[in-house]
Image (cartoon, rainbow, N blue to C red):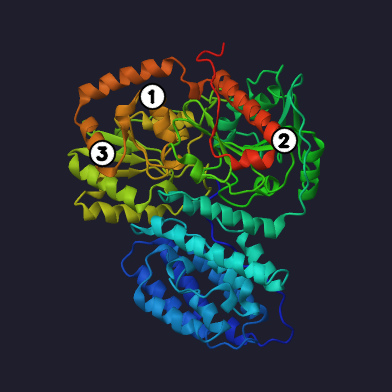
Amino acid sequence: MPPPAAASLPAIAPEKNAPTSRVAGGDFLPAVRKALAAYADEPAAVGVRDRLRETLGRAASEIATFTTRELAGEGRSAVRQLLTDVIASGVHDAPVIGADLELARRLASKGASGLFGAMFLVPAWQWPDAPGFAQVPEGMMIEFAAWIFSAPQGFVERGQAERYPARALHFMTDLVRFARTRSGAPAAREALKAFLQFSCIPLYFCAESLREHYALRAQILQCAVVRPGIEIARQPRLGRRLRVGFVNRHFASQTETYSTLPTFEQLDPARFEVILFALIRGGSPLEDYARSHAAEFRVLPADPRAQVDELRAAGLDVVVFGTNVTAVFNEITRLALHRVAPLQVVNNSSCATTGLPEIDLYVSGTLTETVDASEHFTERLGLLPGPAHAFNYEADRLEPAGTWTRAALGLPDDAIVFVTAANYFKIIPEMRAAWARLLAAVPNSRLLVHPFNPNWSSEYPVKRFAAECDEVLAAQGVATDRLVISSMKLRSRSDVKELLRIGDVYLDTFPFGGVNSLVDPLELGMPVVAWEGRTFRSRMGAALLRELGLNELVATDEAGYLALATRLAGDATGRAKLKSDIDERMSRTPVFLDPLAASEAFGALLEAAFDELVAVGRTEFRRRREPVRVMVAGNPA
């Protein structure tokens, strides 16, 4: 999954004869760059962040004095690039201090230049009364909209993950209102274009439903990119095979491929004709394996309109979008905005409801959803028996490059070692605080985290993360050397498993839990501590444990989570018994590791949904709130 990144500020053509010497020669430009470099190098050093804030305050005040002409041309480009760099630095993720917020308000009241300066001081999501789109001068819309939709790199303070979605919802509501009242106007088009850079990933880390957020996002995306829709004819499947297309950005080694592959690789060819569509042909072993389990493999053209036309011309009955369309606006999100088949489906690669009006079915699982789960989705919910996920990690499995010892990582042989490979973005301040309390409660314990995997991002704020962890450990009186942070780039999941093998207990995260990452410790027979909530995102890993009959490893609140982890840490005999149980249950090939069972269930769900869609029509199919369910044989063979 792509990371939450700051939206870049688009270029503007220079204004002829605009006086730019005051901007280009202003001493605040090099001063800000110097302060940014110091912050990037030592984000936790005493005084570094304060000096950066002071420097930004002086720069903002100077920018606020510029005339419109002085902010044109090269000067505007220089200031815009500097603002992009400030946002990308992550300094805006820290809690805003009152003095900065008050200065931002004063500057913004002075007009376009003042607002430009204010954007250097605080992020929109931490400014409770930030200006709205209708209050912004048209000449400032490009910069303003990009600033509004700049997402945090990561949350720093407890409560931010819960507060952020409300601010994002406010901004999206304001943009929808503005776009409707200014339909077709240049300022509205610029604001919509800026929204295409918006990352929704920070929304994932709240505990509540995101249905309203994604419904609004869909409205905005439709305004920005969709051409007039068409209707696709529906033909009953009686006496013929369903023609099913699976659309992924690629079928190379990535989590989205591993979880999409079991949904089609063993579909009965007498009932299904499988066509794979990709934007990229990589020629990897995993792609070759996927191609060998489909009737056709097609690479879509580069032009977005031609992509839609080719999918429509394929004569599909069902299309399944297997790339995450809920994180950022990508090529597959663009395609999912269009009608290309009678039944359009997203699988669990998308971490929340899509909100997209052309997606008819969201596929989850009976163990991954609560009784009221349909209210969290704009789509009709389809429920597989058991967990939502299944994986095929064997198709391109590599042998590990080496092994690890505790000594090599500075971990005592007699220590209780908690381990996790949860991604950096999931380790929000509340999770860091809970783990610090756990270490404080378990003497002679250590925590090894491996959070910087390439599936979410190619670049992480490693130094900042380490500094934030040190701070929370110190607050609990825990020595910082009891936390080991791995920033190694490991070749394959086999190498990740070798790293985790040195641990005693695996820790999952909340409210966005793991699922791919939980398979690793389970294959090692390691006890897993999961924390289950109400939404799909917080129930994925717990569903795997419940499928294995390990309900005792699932907590439902923080107190239960900490109590469970503490008990496991102090019970070596109990851990050994659990390891034996996990090994035995995993040896029976649970459904989430059984491609045949997974394909059979997924195929049956597609048939049931398609038949109902044909019988009652799309409007009625979508109106019905009861999930589409299927019963499949316990042993499909």
Q: Amino acid at mark 1?
A: Leu
Q: Relative to 301, is 258 above or below? A: above
Mark 1 element type: loop
At a point 35% along the width and 58% down the height, the residue shown is 159
Q: Amino acid at mark 3?
A: Gly
Q: Nearer the viewer, residue 554 or 213?
A: 213
Q: Nearer the viewer, residue 569 or 318?
A: 318
Disc 2 and disc 1 in contact, CB within 8 angstroms: no
Disc 2 and disc 3 in contact, CB within 8 angstroms: no
The residue to which callout 1 is attached is 524
The residue to which callout 2 is attached is 277
Quick one: quadrant of the C terminus? top right
Q: Earlier in the sequence, mark 2 or mark 1?
A: 2
Q: Earlier in the sequence, mark 3 or mark 1?
A: 1
Q: Nearer the viewer, residue 621 or 79?
A: 621
Q: Amino acid at mark 2?
A: Phe
- Circle on res. 560: 3
Looking at the picture, how far across and down is residue 431, in whole percent? 33, 47
